[in-house]
Image: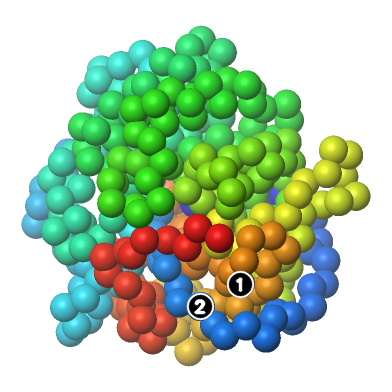
């Protein structure tokens, strides 16, 4: 995950990568972010609760082949052990992506088995959960937007039941990554959520991995507008929660500075009263902010140099931004795009470009809880 300005991001398969697979759509122009005041909150900083990475395997987010244990560990060991410390660098990984139409149709082909990517196996899930790291799978991504539309039109409730069964089979949570900007099928998505929740009811304690159901939104409120309005008004309320939280995805490129990143996130906190219909404010405790950990041909500070990173610069904002709704200041935390090989070009996060010096140091400095604790509800 992370799209995120208002027009949002490329990720490989989602708008996250500047150079995505041939099947991926081209970059959207990113609207300039408005200036935002410094974190106007006198509240004491709250702990970071969610600190995770989207994970693209070694084939650019297809997860089309079964991985060997030793080979997978060589590429990803930094996620479960930060340098010489026997503690993970993250408390969440989101395996990205599942094709929603293949999931609905229970497709079996070269890269998919009964609708699930062949590389998303119980062994991969256990690799992380044995280290205390929560695992989710992401359904969608920008490449699979048409697949989402077709599946929702064909049998939205059936897709929700298939997603719930996938969660049960692997023992994971599910992320909705439906990146239809114009006229999304919100009635269908509601039916999907209802069917999923019928199998895995909302769990405020977070004890059931399968009950964790989240959604990706743009970096700010100026892209995926209809989806953001619906999610904020109906699914991410603090009084009647349906989804656990949202991820404000990455914009088309890494923000230039902390102010740019914070401007995106502030839009979710403030909402858009000037829109018709308006987008209501979103409680900070109901979303994470997205940054890149891998992009292009050289390491980013998020990966290798915490002292120079945007996560260090934005942490005071993330931990204290004042809420317009609910009772608690501070966002849930961060998500990073993306571990291993998020693009056909670029170095990714595989050796020798692993991320102990960035995310690993951050996990220690920010005292990231592993395993993840119950999340704030207000």
Contact between marks 1 and 2 (CB within 8 A): the answer is yes
Q: Nearer the viewer, residue 188 or 233?
A: 233
Residue at horizontal 14%, vertical 59%?
Answer: 130
Colour scheme in use? rainbow
Could one spot residue 64 in this view of the protein?
Answer: no
Q: In terms of secondary structure, where does tag 2 sit?
A: loop
Could you classify mark 2 by the number of other residues whose Cα lies within 10 Å: few (under 14), some (14-19), or many (20 or more)? Answer: some
Give whichever of 155, 31 is nearer the camera. Answer: 155
Q: Which residue is located at x 88 percent, y 39 percent?
A: 276
Q: Is residue 28 left or right of residue 305?
A: right
Determine whether 305 is above or below 95 in the image. Answer: below
Question: Residue 326: horizontal and vertical position, in percent?
Answer: 63, 61
- The residue at the point 58 percent across, 52 percent down is 238
Left or right relative to 34: residue 27: left
Residue 375 sits in quarter: bottom left
Report if residue 212 is visible in the image: yes
Q: Which mark is residue 329?
A: 1
* Residue 227 pos. (x, y %): 67, 37
Give x and y (percent) for residue 50: 42, 64
Q: Which mark is residue 367?
A: none
For label 1, the crowd category at 10 Å Cα-Cα, with few meaning under 14, some 14 to 19 and many 20 or more, is many
Mark number displayed over residue 46: 2
Residue 174, quarter of picture: top left
Q: Nearer the viewer, residue 301 or 160?
A: 160
Q: Nearer the viewer, residue 165 or 20?
A: 165
Secondary structure at numbered mark 1: loop
- Is residue 305 found left or right of 263 in the rendered image? left
**Position of the C terminus by quadrant:** bottom right
């Amino acid at each position: 995950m992370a799209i995120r300005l208002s027009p949002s991001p490329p990720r490989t398969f989602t708008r996250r990568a500047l150079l995505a697979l041939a099947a991926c759509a081209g970059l959207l122009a990113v609207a300039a972010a408005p200036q935002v005041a410094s974190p106007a909150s006198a509240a004491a900083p709250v702990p970071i609760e969610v600190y995770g990475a989207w994970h693209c395997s070694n084939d650019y987010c297809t997860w089309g082949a079964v991985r060997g244990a030793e080979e997978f560990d060589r590429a990803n060991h930094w996620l479960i052990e930060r340098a010489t410390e026997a503690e993970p660098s993250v408390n969440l990984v989101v395996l990205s992506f599942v094709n929603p139409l293949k999931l609905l149709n229970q497709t079996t082909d070269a890269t998919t088995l009964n609708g699930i990517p062949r590389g998303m196996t119980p062994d991969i899930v256990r690799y992380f959960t044995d280290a205390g790291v929560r695992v989710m799978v992401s359904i969608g991504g920008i490449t699979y937007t048409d697949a989402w539309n077709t599946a929702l039109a064909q049998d939205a409730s059936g897709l929700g039941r298939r997603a719930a069964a996938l969660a049960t089979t692997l023992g994971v949570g599910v992320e909705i990554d439906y990146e239809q900007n114009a006229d999304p099928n919100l009635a269908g998505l509601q039916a999907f959520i209802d069917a999923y929740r019928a199998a895995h009811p909302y769990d405020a304690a977070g004890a059931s991995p399968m009950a964790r159901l989240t959604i990706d939104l743009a970096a700010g409120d100026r892209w995926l507008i209809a989806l953001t309005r619906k999610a904020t008004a109906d699914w991410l309320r603090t009084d009647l929660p349906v989804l656990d939280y949202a991820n404000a995805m990455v914009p088309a490129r890494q923000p230039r500075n902390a102010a740019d990143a914070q401007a995106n996130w502030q839009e979710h906190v403030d909402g858009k009263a000037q829109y018709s219909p308006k987008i209501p404010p979103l409680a900070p405790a109901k979303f994470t902010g997205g940054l890149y950990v891998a992009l292009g041909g050289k390491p980013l500070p998020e990966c290798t140099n915490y002292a120079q990173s945007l996560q260090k610069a934005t942490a005071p904002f993330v931990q204290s931004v004042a809420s317009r709704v609910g009772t608690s200041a501070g966002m849930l935390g961060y998500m990073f795009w993306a571990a291993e090989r998020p693009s056909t070009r670029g170095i990714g996060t595989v050796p020798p470009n692993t991320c102990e010096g960035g995310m690993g140091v951050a996990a220690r400095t920010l005292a990231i809880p592993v395993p993840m604790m119950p999340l704030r509800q207000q």
